[in-house]
Amino acid sequence: MIVVCLAAARVSALAGQGNGPIAGVVLDTSGAPVAGARVAVESKAGAGGKPARTAETGVDGRFSLGEATGTEGTLRVRASGFAESVTPLSPGAMTIRVVLQPRPLTESVTVTASRGAAGVDTAASATIVSSAELLTSAAGAIDDALRNTPGFSLFRRSSSRVANPTTQGVTLRGVSGSGASRTLVVADGWALNDPFGSWVYWNRIPLAAVDRVEVVRGAAGDLYGTDALGGVIQVLTLDAERPRVRGLFDAGSHKTYRGSGFGGRRFGNWAISAGAEAQNTDGAYVVAEEARGAVDVPAYSDYGSGFATAGYGSGTWRATFRANLASESRGNGTPIQINETDWRQFSGDLSGALAGGFWTARVTGGSQDYFQTFSVIAADRQTERLNNDQTIPGDFMTAGGQWMRTWKVADVLVGVEGRQTTADINETRYPVVGAPVSTSNPDREEQAASVYGRVRFTLRPDLSLVVGARGDHWESTRSKGFFSPRASVSWRANDMASLQFSVARSYRTPTLNELYRGFRVGNVLTNANPLLEPERLTSVEGGVLVGHGRASARITAFHNVLDDAISNITLTTTPALTTRERQNADQLGSSGVEVEGDLRPHPRVTLSLFGAFTSAHFTSTPKQPAIQDNRVPQVPRYHIGAGVIAETPRLATFSVQARFVGAQFEDDLNELTLDDYIVVDASASRPITRALHVFLGVENLFDVEYDVGRTPVRTIGWPVTVRAGVRVFLP
């Protein structure tokens, strides 16, 4: 496919007849218009000199350079977030379609690394996934697309489309041990992690509304607190600075239907936007065919989510209000096992100028209702009975503020934050004989208050030092205080290479879910533990970023030590039931290397490569000698991937991704192995009109049956899936 794309890309579709103006449109690889792109014509004789004509694309991505009789040279297009495009020109009237490829690694600038205050270079440990890359990927959900970034993994390998949401804990760099997230996931600065259990609802942000996703690996507790033990993932949505409408509608295998949309525009000092998404799917079987019985059915997933924002800005201040609603219903693979969630969140922020800097104050609050059922399944999987159900209503609130100022040699950021989470845990057990027994654990509460700061010193033009720290006070089952410092240094050795080194200390407090809620998956029962202590992470990392011409690469080495690691420890095992409990497993260590690279052999083709090689073991476990030196569960030794995006003027935009994931263990005793696997995804899209594009995507192209879990029954991942649909971009 790559050879065909490269050959087709060499076919010129730009030359016209006669003399006339140069005009055209600039798009990204998904077909969306790129506004504000800088377009310049450079004459052949004056290459490198002053451009003969310049223009900027409008909100619809279109540009015109007026009369260009006899023009011969190059058309150069630059836009923030994209690689530069250079197109040869020949004399004659021109109507040009320019498709911009993703930015190279050397141009990655994030706001996540500075808590949204301003974009900063993070040479060693940040990955940017653009909206165009998400839309051209065959993946059906954001978390599936993020599997093509180094070090990213969920507690289990299953897609969030069919997995129980409580297993959707995000891990970076092998800092794991249980299903809870060690990574903070935020949308426009607000946490997507569930406040009760820290799992992530990826479908709360409509795909059509996503501008980009930033993945910052490494401890970020100095800015983001206890949830950011292993890093931060931020989903940034489109703004309303210019009028736009985006729509995505597709249908596919397993009777899957999805609609996603976004719209926004500015009216004077007001800016409004809204997004919504809904999906229904009959789902797929989660139990391997050889183990299925009469009770096994496809795991369905139906959800709807939406948000609306309204902002007003005047002079030096701005206010924004946002509301977010979500509801989902899931079947977990048998008739009895289901779960439902209803989510409501409201937030507001106010910002302005103060003392030569910029301040922001934010508050958010909301509530959710969570319901789940559990069953006992016979050994032959022919029958099941209801074992218990849980109803967990909860409320949460977060408030904070920060101030940032930039001087000639230093950038200063300081802030405060406080949060509170309250939940009732109501459970009903259904014994084989006798009446149901209901219990309640009301008003379980967690509170946290913190103050943080970070200073970036520009020691000289090629050398910078960043130091930061955060102090937290946590109250739940006990009261604890933490200090999370971090220091990093970046050096730009020359135009081709940059180096970075950092050291950090960070903490993670146990969630209310870990402290108070037990659960059952298959024949594995995991008990809660109200005596859990917080985890403490010490991390060191160093990396180099190199770039030359159309190629760039980044290599990062890291070493993490997690003390009092919270893990699911096996207590007893019988043919009918395995019992585990969340316990502090003393210490685990995680060391490894991450590699990322991109190459542009042709202006219309981008090749990418990534790899994460991780060694994660329980290194000192006097409290649990049975797991000493065992590998940390759910962490593969290697995770390797490659991809290509190729655009042909007369055909379509093609995208292919492949990933190879190494074997990992389901359990702390390393007795249940999840084998390695290779999955290939492919997609293609083609414009029908300026605003309408059709696309086709195939996940798991070769229908590989790969392990997701062993409970101890073998469960499997998402099978081959074909999706087709349309994208609409207005203007």
Image: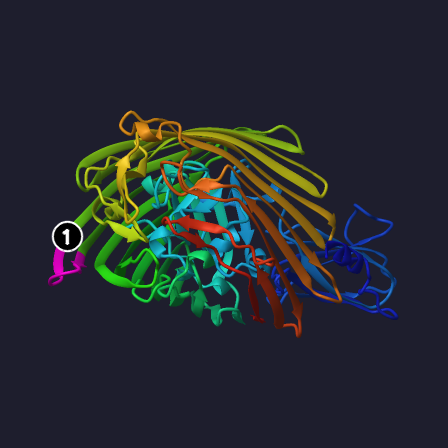
At label 1, the amino acid type is: Asp
The C terminus is located in which quarter? bottom right
Which residue extends farthest front? Answer: 380
Q: Is residue 428 magenta?
A: yes
Asked if one can make out residue 342 in the rendered structure from this viewpoint, the answer is no
Q: Secondary structure at mark 1?
A: strand
Q: Vertically, is 89 above or below 673?
A: below
Horizontally, is 274 left or right of 564 in the view?
Answer: right
Image x and y of residue 175, in percent? 40, 37
Give the quadrant of the N terminus.
bottom right
Range of the magenta residues?
426-441
Residue 162 visible: yes
**Where residue 617 sits in the image (x, y, percent)?**
41, 31
- Residue shown at 66% from the left, 40% from the top: 552
Foreground of the two, 719 or 536: 719
Q: Which residue corresponds to mark 1?
A: 443
**Residue drawn 29% across and 25% down?**
622
Number of disc labels: 1
How far across and how far down the image is residue 592, in percent?
Answer: 51, 32
Which residue occupies 26% across, 28% down?
A: 623
